[in-house]
Image (tube, helix red, strand yellow):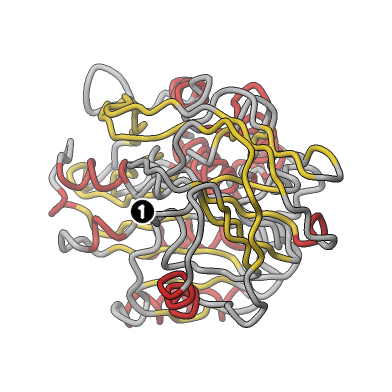
Amino acid sequence: MLLIHLAEGQDVDYARTCLNKLTSKAFHGRGYVKKGDKKAAAFIAEEFRKDNLSSFGEDYFQYYSFPINTFPGKITLEIDDGKLIPGEDFVISCSNKSTDGEFNLVYLPDDIDNDSLFADYYSVNNFRPNDILVAKANLRGLYGKAFEGIAGVMLLSDKSPWWHVSNGAFINNTIWIKAKSSKFIDKPAKARIKFKNEFFADYQTQNIVGFVKGKKYPDKYFVFTAHYDHLGMMGNKAYFPGANDNGSGTSMILDLARHYSLAENRPDYSIVFITFSGEESGLHGSRYFAENPIFDLKNIELLINLDMVGSGSEGITVVNSSIYKDLLEKMRGINDDYSFLKQIKERGESCNSDHCPFYQKGVKAVFIYTMGDELKEYHTINDKADDFPFTAYDGLFKLLTRLVKNN
């Protein structure tokens, strides 16, 4: 059994152990409340150390900073039927400032359901400074933006509210909230809202970088990347575990590092492993690394970014693969030979994960995510490690190591 393990390399049990650790309450959602990112970074660096990975400097860390708004204390939203549960019944925008007051809830017509209709309705009606406009709409383009003359906007949805922190680099005076529509069926007239923000203009965080030196081409690199950060905590109770996004990719990175650290698996090319912070807040970690590389980016043969790889019943998608047809055909050829995955789906350019800053610098870079309905939670408190499927873990791991071997 041991010999089989060493030959195949992948160890899903180890990956699950890493996933359970990364998603635990002790790491506070790997965000910027209670130093969750730093605790996760220390764990990753310790795993690199155990595997005897080399570093490009004195240690595995690359430090940098970015602005971020946080909510470390208690968050309260009360209506006629009582208190709503943060994270479960509602989320607040990361652009919100501290708030403490009672507000009028003004319900908009049901047909005001997109950005342009909302903007038109807002511009032709008179509202009071203490009004919160309530709409059953997405308003993706307007969410978090400032609107003068009103207190805020509440968006209702039949789905569980999902949070994001990508607009946390600024704060404004307009309250934005997403809430479950089932809590507002009786249209309560008032809402009592209280929370306090803490804004960091220069929050120091870190990327973690380690490598295994190649036998034949030590100055040529295959690079595996994943972001280890997630949304962290919204208030002092709601934390977002981020199992699929992206505990899954980080856990696979750690397993790959473990695999290549074994003498019998040492590759011809050097293999670099980078885990980024700051992805959820705007690709900050990968942008910083691409602008401040600690090795020559021109020496990268291929960069593979792993983000949300916990499913796989429908195969994988490879972003940027339409740009690199040779790579796509090589991956599909391997898969045809070994039937690792159900399919390898082609996709074009998209700046939707940490591959993007490298691609913009001319690096051959792709982003892989798995497909399948077995994992549907995204940016909610329910993206947990409990009963995590890792459906295509074995196949994807073997595809990646075979791809490196066949280069």
Q: Position of residue 313 (x, y in %)?
A: 71, 70
Residue kind at label 1, given as amino acid type? Asp
Residue drawn at (47%, 55%), measured in percent from left and top? Answer: 306
Q: Position of residue 229 (x, y in %)?
A: 48, 38
Q: Position of residue 265 (x, y in %)?
A: 46, 43
Image quadrant in which you'd find residue 18: top right
The quadrant the C terminus occupies is bottom left
Residue drawn at (22%, 23%), measured in percent from left and top? Answer: 57
The relative height of residue 196 versus residue 225 in the rendered view (above or below) is above
Q: Is residue 103 left or right of residue 266?
A: right
Front-lying residue, 126 or 177: 126
Front-lying residue, 397 or 69: 69
The quadrant the N terminus occupies is top right
Q: Position of residue 38 (x, y in %)?
A: 45, 22
Q: Mark 1: few, some, or many residues within 10 Å (few <14, many ≥20)?
A: many
Task: Name the residue that disc number 1 marks.
Answer: 354
The relative height of residue 300 versus residue 119 in the rendered view (above or below) is above
Residue drawn at (68%, 38%), measured in percent from left and top? Answer: 192
Query: In the orientation shown, which residue stands out farthest toward the top?
Result: 58
